[in-house]
Image (cartoon, grey):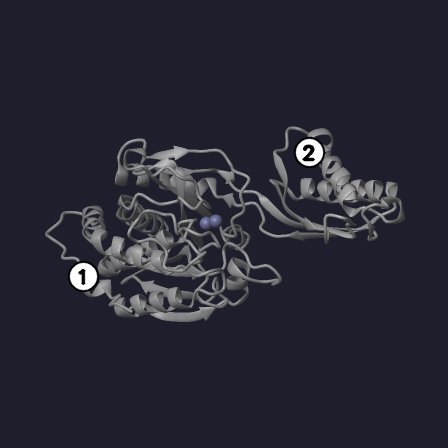
Amino acid sequence: MRALLFFAALATILPAQTLDDKIAQIAKSLQPLLVECRRDIHMHPELSNNEVRTGKLIVEKLRALGLEDIKPNIAGNGVTALLKGAKPGPVVAWRADMDALPIDESTFAAPYKSTVKGVKHACGHDAHTTISLGIAETLNQLKSEIPGTIKFIFQPAEEGVSGVTDYGARLMIKEGALENPKPNAIFAFHVASNVPTGKIAYTDNAASSASTGINITFKGRRAHGAYPYQGIDAVAVASQCILALQTIHSRRIDTVNPSVFTLGTIHGGDRRNVIAETISLTGTLRTFSESITDQYEKMIRQTLDGCTSAMNASYELGFKRGNLPMLNSPALNKAALPVIDKALGPNAALSQGPGLYGEDFSAYQRVIPGTMFFLGISNPAKGITAGLHTAEFDIDEDALSIGVHAGSKILLDYLTRNAQ
Ligand SMILES: [Zn+2]
Ligand SMILES: [Zn+2]
């Protein structure tokens, strides 16, 4: 493994007037090292709950910085650490996620493409980790002027792990990430492929949706393909049920409530000339409220009961509630907007509506107020336009130092305003 101690090359602070100027200057000077760090993580992506190398890299860099109370292996490969300012003040947390996705990027043209076949940082968590390390670096250089403490939270398994009950943010909280000391608020960035580099979007209140994992298994009876009446055709049962299930959204849920019910996989059957006994489906349900999720659960069962009994088949339904909606604090947003505009220029902070994606940052927000900002990384002039979770996804790396600059200022502003 090549040397990772980019913090060894500490940025030099030139004479500067204000703390704001110093932050801007340090963030800018870190840019080459941020690019190196992000590419290193990008080339060595690790799936959820396998972030061993990434976790070690984070610990090494935090130790090199001299941060305090560095705790590795929380919730698997998670890490927390404290940056204690010299002046008294509150505690604020900054969260980054660490895991990659099972997406192959072997056709990706960049020289820093993944060295792990079938695994890619397609959600920008490589950038989140890098930016958090950069914020730690920046504020650490200025800690004599900082009132209060920053708790850095590096979290594994945001993308989810099947077959495991607790992982990611919920397990980090269970294992004490928000205790000793308890932060008063928490912030995070997520890169956004719909936001241009140099801008940061925000959403008040519900920003992401509740997500529920759906598993349906239809059970029929196997028979010779030439004698379907002797069996119960699970393919025909599944086909009828899939179409009937689509009418829940289109005909039964109040149309003012946005939701999406997607069945993403279907598997089953043995052979072209055998009546299929079993068909399995998996899918996801996204809503902005628990009561709408409750309605879906009831209606999915009603539909499957009716549809399968009409064809003398049976079914099993798995309905696994996952992430809650992310509820971003309007008060934290409101305070941060002028800070973002001051750092990145007029109208750098953009309001945006909610999306039906899942994000486990929502778990921290059930314990303390928090907000996630959406960091612009798109740059059509550089051909960087692909969406998250695609094989072509990339970030405009100029966003790294921009993120360090804005993130450092958001944290410092929070601490300063709440220091009395
Ligand atoms: Zn993702
Ligand atoms: Zn993500």
Residue 266 in the image, given as x and y percentages of width and height: 66, 47
x 42%, y 68%: residue:
52
Query: In this figure, what is the number of numbered marks?
Result: 2
The N terminus: image quadrant: bottom left
Q: Are marks 2 and 1 in contact (CB under 8 Å)?
A: no
Determine which residue is flagged by label 2.
Answer: 249
x 69%, y 30%: residue:
250
Res. 345 in view: yes
Say which quarter of the image contains residue 245: top right
Residue 40 in the image, given as x and y percentages of width and height: 31, 59
Name the element at disc 1.
loop
* Cα gap from disc 2 to disc 1, whole angstroms: 55 Å
N-terminal-most mark, 2 or 1: 1
The amino acid type, in three-letter code, at marker 1 is: Leu
Q: Is residue 409 left or right of residue 185?
A: left
| Front residue (pair 272, 364) | 272
| Front residue (pair 95, 52) | 52
Q: Which mark is residue 238?
A: none
Name the element at disc 2.
helix
| Front residue (pair 20, 348) | 348
Look at the picture and state if 350 lies above or below 68. Answer: above
Q: Is residue 277 left or right of residue 322?
A: right
x 87%, y 40%: residue:
310
- Label 1 Cα neighbours within 10 Å, binned few <14 / some 14-19 / many ≥20: some
- Label 2 Cα neighbours within 10 Å, binned few <14 / some 14-19 / many ≥20: some
Determine which residue is flagged by label 1.
Answer: 10
Residue 328 in the image, given as x and y percentages of width and height: 49, 43
Task: Answer yes or no: disc 2 within 8 Å of ligand 1.
Answer: no
